Image (cartoon, rainbow, N blue to C red):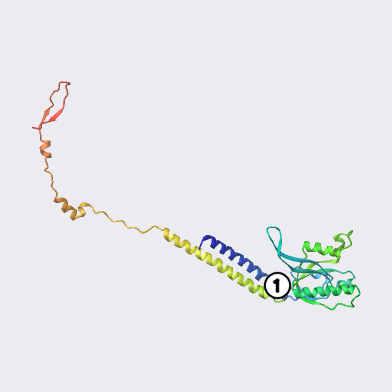
Amino acid sequence: MSNTLKLRLFICGVILIIAGIACAGDSLAQKREMAKGMMDFNEMQASDFYKGQYVQGELLELWDEFAYMEEYTETALGRKTNSRVSAHYYIMPLQTSYENGTPVFAAVCLKNVTQISAAEQMINEMNDYWDEESDGLYTSIPITGKVSVLDDELKQYFYEWLMYGDEESSTSDYDQFVCPYIITAVQPNSSSSTLSMGVVMTLIGAVLVGAVVFVTIKSKREAGKDMSPQAVQYGDVPYPEQDSTLMNDMAKLHQPEDNADEFFNRPIKPHEKSDSDNGLGIGIDDK
């Protein structure tokens, strides 16, 4: 396995572990929040909402759609492809605000196709009611929703809808009419599937990371064995006296006679004078 492939698998494994833990954690948090008991949003004041809360109830009135979310792929030339609308955002009056005489509006996000179709029917019924073409509202949508803070971009569209035709006013003049939270419809049983998916992703990621670590350690160990010094053994070279065969061969060789005594017993005589200079020397008589 190449180092590049191991690095890619390791990164994929880490990403899967992080994503899996995030999914599982979100699912467990959702289960804990739902276990507290969900309030009916038709009985709640604006001050009763908080981030991360789960609520339930029936959508009785939807006044209009004020925004939608579009998902698409952008090409290198800046063109949109594979475009689709994945979410719709609606204006919903809080039912309790009618009791106080000041209407307060909250945002609702729907993603389910059936719920979106019913929401369009509710808006049409509301328009007919205002135009006195109908004597009531007949469609409602039961939902379970998660509460989150209305982000700045949606809040801008929300205020633009409320302030339509009143350009002289500022957003602060309309703060009393706005609940700063949005209710996003969710599937009640989605937490279980999300938890299962998170666990599976975490396990797959752990297997990938573990496999890469195992292969890397194994490769290093095998490389270490190949580079370790080879075991060697030195042999002694026998001395001549230790090798009887060599000694026997040497004994058969012809040995020269020892003439040292004759050499050193020769008489010493004075060196004869030469014509060039007078010098003393010693000589050995070869006669």
Q: Is residue 59 left or right of residue 72?
A: right
Residue 83 % position (x, y):
72, 66
Residue plotted at (85% across, 60% down):
172
Q: Is residue 39 visible?
A: no
Report crowding for label 1: few under 14, some 14 to 19, many 20 or more residues within 10 A (C-alpha). Answer: some
Residue 171 percent coordinates (x, y): 85, 60
Closer-to-camera residue (157/22): 157
In the rendered view of the protein, which quadrant contains the C terminus?
A: top left
Q: Say if 40 sits above or below 277 in the image.
A: below
Residue sitting at x 56%, y 69%: 207
| Residue 41 place in picture, x, y as percent | 80, 74
Count of marks overlaid on the render: 1
Asked which quadrant contains residue 236, the reply is bottom left
Q: Nearer the viewer, residue 177 or 244?
A: 177
Q: Looking at the image, which residue is at 54% across and 62% down?
A: 5
Where residue 119 sits, quadrant-wise, is: bottom right
View extreme (right): residue: 132
In front of the other: 130 or 27: 130
- Amino acid type at mark 1: Gln
Circle 1: element type? helix
Give the image location of residue 235, x and y in percent. Answer: 29, 56
- Residue 141, visible in the rendered structure: yes
Q: Hey, which quadrant is residue 78 in on the image?
A: bottom right
For disc 1, the marked residue is 30
Q: Is residue 269 above or below residue 187?
A: above
